[in-house]
Image: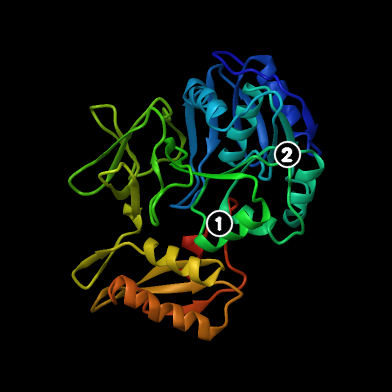
Amino acid sequence: MGKGLRWRGPVLADDRGTIRHLQETVTAGGGVRVGEGAVCAIAPGWIECATSGSSGAPKRIRRTVASWTTSFALNAKLFGLDARSVVALPGTMAQSLTLYAALEAQWNGAALVDLSVHRGDRHLAHMARWGTTHVYATPAQVEVMLKGQGGCPSLRYWIIGGGRLSADLRARLALRVPQARIMQFYGASETSFITLDRGDAPEGSVGRAYPQVEIAVDAAGELRVKSPYLFTEYALGSSPDTCWHADGFLSIGEIGHVDAQGFVYIRGRKGRIVQVLDHLVSPEPAEARLADWLGCDVAVVAQPDSLRGARLWAMVGEGPAPEAVEAALVRLRQELGAVASAHGWQRVAPFPLLPTGKPDIRALEARL
């Protein structure tokens, strides 16, 4: 593929043929567009992939090849990726995280293993069979993978993207693969890497700035990012929260702050902040705590209220008993206060998820 991408490593397992098709497209020198599992050639020097759709209708991102290859070389050093590595792909190419992992592995000469054709609870067994050393996965994928038996003794790095591991899930993952380093990054389809947590981030933080990333916070508390990894434009769709600034910074509607040690804390998406009484409240801190405590799918959504402006409700998936949920809501009010906590809760089964494994907020709002 023109302007830097190359295919160097073997494919150990690819039952769908999608990786083979990606290999053919890269080798032919064209650009790559991936959506809904299909790989298409586009103009050289470009990559197009879909967003997660967690904040609305999925969009298609257009970025330069260089915006990804720059981090390929950095990650080779950070994660020890080389020709001796074996990278497992639990997701499909329709997920930008999976596409990134596949192209990065090949850039560094690593072998690829496609796990997407197997049941999630059998992924660890297949990873062990192929001697997997690295895996990129979302928290939702991790949860399913841990339902299976055994571990993967060859694994050296478990890299988390597409969401934050709850404390409970991280602890269970560490027990299953104790020899592997768990690294978490925070970012978005538009920005790629923003921060990296190497395991030293304080509670509530998403880590420090990833190499070559500048992070600024404006007067409204919105994060702005400048780096070599930013996207170029939307090839399909748009977002009212995405804004390019004259100084080269990009904002995507994330509210947060950076402490004196450089650790970044995310309050939530600007588009999800609601007014409760005279306060502006993000439901995402309540979501994170409930997910930690209950160990199941949870989302906190807003219901319009003529007196309060909005009321927050916890939408809870299968698993915890009603008494456990009620106790968690009491604890939530003690930690966050009544305004920022859920007013009540509702059981949702089956729990609606996006293809990335994130809660489908629009569907949950409709259920409420």
Report the amino acid beneath label 1. Arg
Q: Please state if 367 lies on the left or on the right of 271 as rendered.
A: right
Q: Find residue 278 and report its image quarter.
A: bottom left
Q: Please state if 65 lies on the left or on the right of 264 as rendered.
A: right
Figure check: 333 above or below 218: below
Badge 2, how many Cα within 10 Å: few under 14, some, many 20+? many
Q: What is the x, y in percent for residue 153?
A: 73, 45
Can residue 160 be seen in this snapshot? no
Secondary structure found at label 1: helix
How far apart in space, not on screen, are marks 2 and 1 (Cα)?
Answer: 19 Å
Report the amino acid beneath label 2. Thr
Which of the image's four quarters has the N terminus?
Answer: top right
Residue sitting nearer the eye, 363 or 189: 189
User: What is the total number of numbered labels drawn onto the structure image?
Assistant: 2
Residue appearing at x 79%, y 50% in the figure: 125
Q: What is the x, y in percent for residue 262?
A: 31, 41
Q: Please state if 10 lies on the left or on the right of 96 as rendered.
A: right
Badge 1, how many Cα within 10 Å: few under 14, some, many 20+? some
Looking at the image, what colour scheme do you see?
rainbow
Q: Please state if 27 lies on the left or on the right of 272 as rendered.
A: right
Residue 132 is marked as 2
Residue appearing at x 76%, y 56% in the figure: 150
Residue sitting nearer the eye, 328 or 35: 328
Figure check: 336 above or below 94: below
Residue 202 is marked as none
- The residue carrying mark 1 is 170
